[in-house]
């Protein structure tokens, strides 16, 4: 006699690595910054920067005219998970009952939609985590805002981004102040980015439209799309990770680092039915961590505490 095997989650399980990669790599911020895959727990970041100052050629011992900087810091990833148990029979009491099979159900009828929604929710939660203003814990990695607030190399400015009545001149003045605090040697970097919340992005674009003094195309700016700030080589990037935090972060996007694994079976996206307790079970396992190369390449602007 053959065993009867309940096979729920074939679509999800067959696409496990694709789904977990989508949940992490397509997050709003991570698509712009530096990604370091293959980190199991902790890894050392090494980044070499050098210049070549020209001097007059002469006999004898030459004078040192160049400088070289080597960063050496750790990035640590946290092993995290999302777990959920659902009884398919509970759906019989809802509008989904017409989608349920006759008899005892061992699967859910909307597997793909369920997985897609889980991916979107994980993206939002990762965004909030990596920008968090709190320290690392057992349930989250350290957030950039927390790290910046505790790094003396990071430049700080004071500005009330949520103040009523902020005008285009107010916003432009603060952004230019932030830009001028960056080292001259990175002023021409092509990925200078101002990370803000979507609501702050909308306030800024609205003020510029009201001022009607700047030749910028804001017709496609909906609060979630990035846009070019007038008068400088700078992209404004709205991110849901900064929702609820009235701060702005200016840095080359490539200066920010997200570490993950994505090459290990411990990172997975799984859905299955368990005969042990007659439950449909969902599991997301992943690793995530944040760091950055140079604190002096970061300007953090926020209201005075």
Image (cartoon, rainbow, N blue to C red):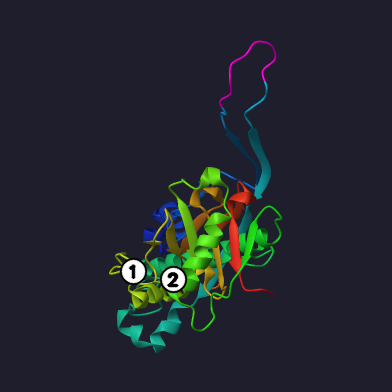
Q: Give x and y (percent) for residue 216.
A: 32, 64
Please determine whether, in this image, residue 66 is positioned above or below residue 276.
above
Q: Give x and y (percent) for residue 94.
A: 38, 87
Secondary element at tag 1:
loop
Mark 1 or 2, nearer chain start? 2
Say which of 63 and 96 sits in front: 63
Q: Main secondary structure of the magenta part?
A: loop
* Mark 2 surroundings: few (<14), some (14-19) or many (≥20) residues within 10 A: many
Magenta region, residue range = 54-62
Q: Give x and y (percent) for residue 72.
A: 68, 40
The residue that label 1 is drawn on is: 221
Please determine whether, in this image, residue 120 is positioned above or below residue 262.
below
Q: Give x and y (percent) for residue 135.
A: 69, 64
Was residue 116 drawn as part of the magenta stretch in this picture?
Answer: no
User: Is residue 38 visible from the viewing direction of this image?
Assistant: yes
Circle number at residue 158 = none
Secondary element at tag 2:
helix
Query: Which image quadrant is residue 97 in?
Result: bottom left
């Amino acid at each position: 006699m053959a065993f009867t095997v309940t096979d729920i989650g074939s679509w999800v399980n067959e696409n496990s690595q694709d789904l977990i990669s989508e949940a992490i790599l397509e997050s709003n911020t991570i698509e712009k910054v530096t990604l370091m895959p293959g980190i199991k727990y902790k890894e050392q970041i090494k980044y070499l920067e050098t210049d070549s100052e020209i001097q007059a050629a002469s006999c004898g011992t030459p004078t040192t005219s160049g400088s070289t900087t080597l960063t050496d810091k750790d990035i640590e990833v946290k092993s995290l998970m999302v777990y959920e148990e659902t009884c398919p029979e509970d759906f019989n009491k809802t509008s989904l009952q017409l989608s349920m099979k006759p008899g005892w159900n061992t699967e859910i009828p909307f597997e793909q939609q369920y997985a897609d929604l889980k991916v979107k929710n994980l993206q939002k939660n990762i965004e909030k985590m990596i920008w968090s203003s709190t320290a690392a814990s057992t349930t989250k990695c350290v957030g950039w805002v927390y790290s910046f607030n505790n790094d003396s190399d990071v430049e700080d400015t004071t500005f009330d981004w949520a103040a009523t009545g902020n005008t285009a001149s107010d916003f432009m003045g603060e952004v230019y102040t932030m830009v001028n605090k960056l080292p001259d040697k990175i002023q021409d970097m092509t990925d200078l980015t101002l990370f803000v919340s979507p609501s702050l992005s909308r306030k800024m674009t609205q003020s510029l439209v009201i001022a009607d003094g700047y030749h910028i195309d804001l017709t496609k700016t909906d609060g979630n799309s990035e846009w070019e700030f007038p008068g400088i080589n700078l992209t404004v990037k709205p991110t849901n990770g900064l929702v609820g935090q009235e701060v702005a972060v200016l840095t080359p996007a490539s200066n920010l680092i997200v570490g993950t694994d994505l090459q290990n079976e411990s990172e997975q996206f799984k859905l299955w039915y368990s005969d042990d307790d007659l439950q449909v079970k969902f599991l997301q396992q992943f690793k995530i961590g944040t760091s950055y190369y140079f604190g002096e390449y970061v300007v953090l602007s926020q209201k005075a505490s």
